[in-house]
Image: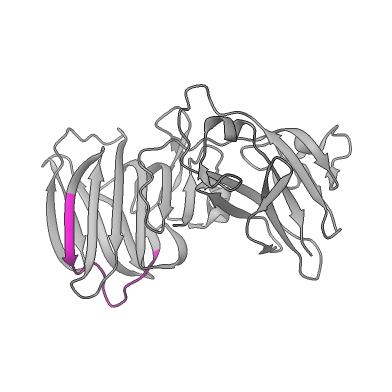
Amino acid sequence: MTIIYMDGFDYADATDLARMGWTRGGGDGIVSGRYGGSAYKTGWGGYFSFSSQSTLAIGFAGYHETGNHMISLRSGTTQHFGIQIYPGAGHLIVNLAGSTHVVNLGFSYYVGLFSHFQIYWVGSTSSTGVFRLWINSRLALDLNNVQTAVSVNTADRIYGDVGVYDDLWITTGELLGDIKVHHLVPNSTVSASWSRYPSSLTANHEAVDELNPNDDTDYVYTSTAGATDVYEFTDLPATASAVRAVGIHTMARKDDAGSRSMRSFLRIGATNYPGATVNLPDSYAWIKDYWLQNPATGTDWTVADVNNLRAGVELIS
């Protein structure tokens, strides 16, 4: 199983949302999150793109901001399912591959109050699909051996449809549950072979310690293939008790005329565990890597694992 995307939106501004992979809709922006951080209010027509998948699990804390629309899954502009909420009537409607399903909410739903949603979808243009919906840990809709897709069996976009989202995750099939995404930042330099800008900074981590990246205000850089920087990070809050996944979000670009590639990595003990090698664009973009389990042990992450974790960047070419 693969994590496609995981975000708590606590760092983001409108520019970073676009660089993370969101095509922004009109009127979108950053609003208050459910635990005192931030959340993303999508504008109408805004969506997140990913590679085509035939099985998806999606989870988020959210509410619809205006109208009735909450979220939809599509291949391009072809909608496979859409969820609309009617709080006054006490129900929601799932439009699934042309069929309509009415779901009683079973609780008081208020605009501005976060509820937690999980969706499991297996795409099928025949009668072999699966669609399940949980709301606040309650299984609200369970459909098996039904048509769940229109014209193609895969999906590659999630439309926000004027919803507010926090602690969003998308996987290729595994349910992660109601989680809180914590953004940890570098707070110490373990080793440095990249240079830093401005040179007045005393250590490399000071150039990359922002939740909201400041682009060319400060940064680390190198032209030497194989060069690495390694950092320690802030700890998880004391209230954290279990860890479902660990990810690295790295913002980078190149300024050479030729091609450049790099990767992020976890360092556990003396071993580096690399993410994917990425060809760098000319403008800043996010590089996203995720690990469901500790790659050193092959077991689930612990809070101690994360608090002892180091991570870094490497220029490949």
- In the displayed structure, would residue 57 be above or below residue 270? below
x and y, in percent, of residue 305 in the image: 58, 35
Residue 85 shows up from this direction = yes
Residue, far top: 238
Position of the N terminus by quadrant: bottom left
x and y, in percent, of residue 317 in the image: 79, 65
Residue 252 shows up from this direction = no
What residue appears at the point 40 percent right and 63 percent down from the top-left corner? 157
Question: Which image quadrant is residue 146 in?
Answer: bottom left
Q: Which residues are magenta?
A: 141-156
The front one of 116 and 64 is 116
The front one of 259 and 213 is 259
What residue appears at the point 23 percent right and 54 percent down from the top-left corner? 132
From the viewer's perspective, is 309 left or right of 81?
A: right
Query: Magenta stretch: residue 134 in it?
Result: no
Query: Magenta stretch: residue 152 in it?
Result: yes
Residue, far bottom: 151
Looking at the picture, the colour scheme in use is one colour
Question: Which image quadrant is residue 211 in?
Answer: top right
From the viewer's perspective, is 281 left or right of 59?
A: right
Question: Which image quadrant is residue 270 in?
Answer: top right
x and y, in percent, of residue 183 in the image: 56, 37
